[in-house]
Image (cartoon, helix red, strand yellow):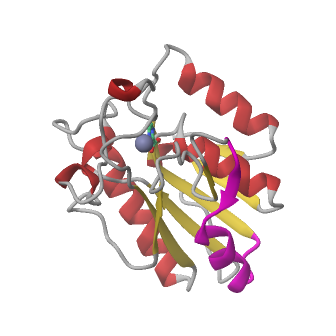
Amino acid sequence: MTPRYDTTTALVVVDVQNDFAAPDGGLYVSQGEAVVPAVNAEIDAAREAGAMVVYTQDWHPETTPHFSKDGGVWPTHCVQGTWGAELHPDLTVDGPVVRKGVDGGDGYSGFSVRDPVSGEESATELGRILEDTQIRRVVVTGLAGDVCVKATALDARALGYEVVVPLATTRFVELEAGDGQRAVEELRSAGVEVVPA
Ligand code: VGL
Ligand code: ZN
């Protein structure tokens, strides 16, 4: 089901990038390519209603404690300037793109960056973009549902927005089996409206 859009609603499209959404991507999320038409349909609905669309892009340096080769948990993905970091070629792009992870932090949430060494958090432009346009409701879509979509939706809730996550527009990476189901429960307990696919 498509959430309703209006000028106080923002659609946030999280990390629909080749490394997550293409079968030969560096951190392919199973069925990740299936989110592209589903997200495009949301983008069309949002644009028709005059709602803003904002994109995030995972944008890591070559070396970061985010990657398993450097002591983290993830295979190398979304390295700045590479094919894998590009937004999926079939995604409709019409709005600002906020890059995260740029400084070597994990950058899970579109709203904050965390310094990998000090652990200190600071804000990205996403929060300011939503404040400047008087947004009260945020629809969070994209990849991956149990990582960056979850972190972005939880931060949006913490910032006081009404938050909707349509499951048809996301897929789970499941670093550990059950992460997807746990993410849905966590989102629901935080007051996020999780729309069944
Ligand atoms: C993501 C794992 C590592 C995501 C980003 O976009 O969900 N997942 N980096
Ligand atoms: Zn990443």
Q: Residue at x 51, y 53 (%)?
A: 141
Name the foreground residue: 4 vs 86. Answer: 86
Residue 168 % position (x, y): 47, 45
Measuring from the top left, give residue 166's x and y in whole percent: 56, 49
Q: Position of residue 59 (x, y in %)?
A: 38, 55
Residue placed furthest toward the top: 177
Q: Position of residue 136 (x, y in %)?
A: 77, 72
**Quadrant of residue 39 within the rendered picture:** bottom left
What stretch of residues is rendered in magenta?
A: 119-136
Quarter holding ligand 2: top left
Who's the residue at 64% across and 23% down the image?
182
Along the viewing direction, whichever of 159 and 3 lies nearer the viewer: 159
Dividing the picture into quadrants, the one containing residue 133 is bottom right
Residue 123 highlighted magenta (yes or no): yes
Position of 96 with respect to 186 (left or right) is left
Say how many tags the image has: 0
